[in-house]
Amino acid sequence: MGPFVPVVKGDHPVSLTGRGPRVGLLGGSFNPAHAGHLHISRLAFKRLRLAEVWWLVAPQNPLKPADDMATLTERLANARTAAISAAWRGRVWVTDIERELGTCYTADTLKALKRRFPDRRFVWIMGADNLIEIPRWHGWKAIFDAVPVAV
């Protein structure tokens, strides 16, 4: 099944044929996953008519110190527990695909995901708190060129 770990039993998250579904991407440290992650995922499902949301748990956020960071394994487990508790469980996929892709910047991750999953229509989801910080993100303008962004 690759880097995706469903929060409930099931097959691959989405069909690989035809015009693919709209998939929301919510990236972050998830240190820990919290009500804000659930809230913006819930809003994104409702307002953007998403088939799924993929939580991209970053191995290490380049803008955050590693000192206070739980291990990737711990953060993945916590995020999966939080996603299971959501009413739309089975439509949230928790993954550390950035580790597999070898990317640490969102712009590079989006480029790699679009190559790997050409049938998906990705939407980047972010909280307003991150929008304030976006000029500090490496290649941030490329994010807006690559996919629609929902704040």
Image (cartoon, rainbow, N blue to C red):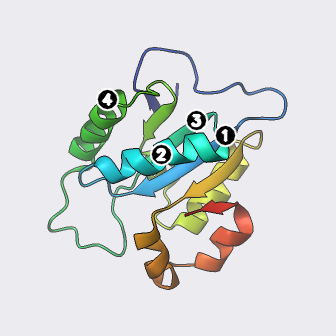
Disc on the earlier residue, 3 or 2: 2
Q: Amino acid at mark 2?
A: Ser
- Is the residue under label 2 in contact with that under label 4 (CB below 8 Å)? no
- Is the residue under label 2 in contact with that under label 1 (CB below 8 Å)? no
Helix, strand or loop at mark 2? helix
Disc on the earlier residue, 1 or 2: 2
Label number found at residue 41: 2
Percent position of residue 86, x then y: 37, 31
On the image, numbered disc 1 is attached to which residue?
Answer: 49
On the image, numbered disc 4 is attached to which residue?
Answer: 85
Of discs 3 and 2, which sits in the foreground? Answer: 2
Q: CA distance from mark 1 to mark 2?
A: 11 Å
Q: CA distance from mark 4 to mark 2?
A: 13 Å
Q: Amino acid at mark 3?
A: Glu
Q: At 27% across and 32% down in the image, what residue appears?
A: 81
Q: CA distance from mark 4 to mark 3?
A: 16 Å
In the foreground, 50 or 97: 50
Indicate the quadrant where residue 133 lies: bottom left
Disc on the earlier residue, 4 or 2: 2
Indicate the quadrant where residue 67 lies: bottom left
